[in-house]
Amino acid sequence: MKKILLCAFSLLCIGMAQSQEEENDTIPNGWTREGNVQLLFNQSAFNKEWTGGGTSSIAGNLSVDYQFNYKMDDFSWNNRIFGNYGLTKVKDDEFVRKTSDRLELTSIAGKRIQESNFYYSWFLNFRTQFAKGYEFSEDAETGKTVRTEISDFMSPAYLQTGPGIMWKKTDDLVINFAPATARFIFVNKDFTTRPGYVDGDYFGVDEGKTMRFELGASLSGYSKYEIMENVSMEHTLSLYSNYLDKPGNIDIDYLLNVEMGINDYLSANLVFQAIYDDNAVGAFQIREVFGLGINFGF
């Protein structure tokens, strides 16, 4: 965990260092809007004579990123909706499997403190998934693959909100600390009423309940910058400590997106994500996606 945190903070600091000589904020008053739709493809194929081993597969990943921000003198309000959904099909596998599934809304309002880069802030973050999630196993008798539903839309869903202090250099470099953050974890009651359910086994929610309430501290950071011509790197880091239960166990959600531009419509993308939440799994959840992307900006 320490290595992941150190790496994430180091990359955020690189973005801060590269932005120190930029103008503080040249965004005009009023609304600004920007969006992007991207479709990533991954494909591999082997014929029956291929001796090196391998299994044919095809995968696709669709993401939608829309930002709508408002600024009026010393007041700013930044909003972002991000959706990502990916599927993969491996030859001879009965089921199509998810590779990514995320729906997130982030909103943060800030009032500048005099002429500094610091703001009084209030943030809201909502996160869930689009579709059902499954755990795959093998039937001991038949040998067939069996899938068991373990998650769904709004199960789980996370809602965080609270006041804090924001440091903001530009819209592409923001750090927010909220020491009194309320967090709600919502789940479908079907998962917490299953026979033999033990309190807290499903994202920390008690038996027969649909929600868990937490109060803690939240630290989030966002950084985006170019590391070379036509190659940009974007980092999103979210940390949370629950005062009410095991405050030393820090929840981590780190997302890295590297975009390598080919032209206005094509790019190669690397996505890396690391999540630690001991209410879900007492270990890091890691995913990585690399592929050729088709982009459409609006």
Image (cartoon, rainbow, N blue to C red):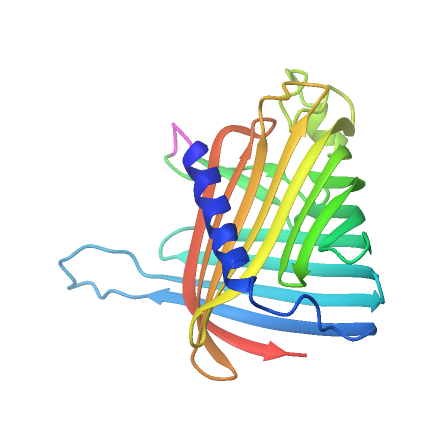
User: Hey, which quadrant is residue 139 in on the image?
Assistant: top left
Span colored in magenta: 138-142
Q: Is residue 176 above or below residue 292?
A: above
User: Hey, which quadrant is residue 216 in on the image?
Assistant: top right
Which residue is rendered at x = 59% and y = 33% of the image? 251
Q: Position of residue 46 (x, y in %)?
A: 24, 64
* Front residue (pair 295, 11): 11
Picture quarter with the N terminus: top left
Q: Position of residue 169 (x, y in %)?
A: 65, 59
User: Hey, which quadrant is residue 134 in on the image?
Assistant: top right
* Front residue (pair 110, 46): 110
Picture quarter with the C terminus: bottom right
**Left or right for 204, reference 89:** right
In the rendered image, residue 140 lying in the magenta stretch gets the answer yes
Residue 58 appearing in the image = yes
Secondary structure character of the magenta stretch overall: loop
**Left or right for 256, reference 149:** left
Q: Position of residue 271 (x, y in %)?
A: 47, 57
* Front residue (pair 143, 154): 154
Which residue is rendered at x = 64% and y = 34% of the image? 240
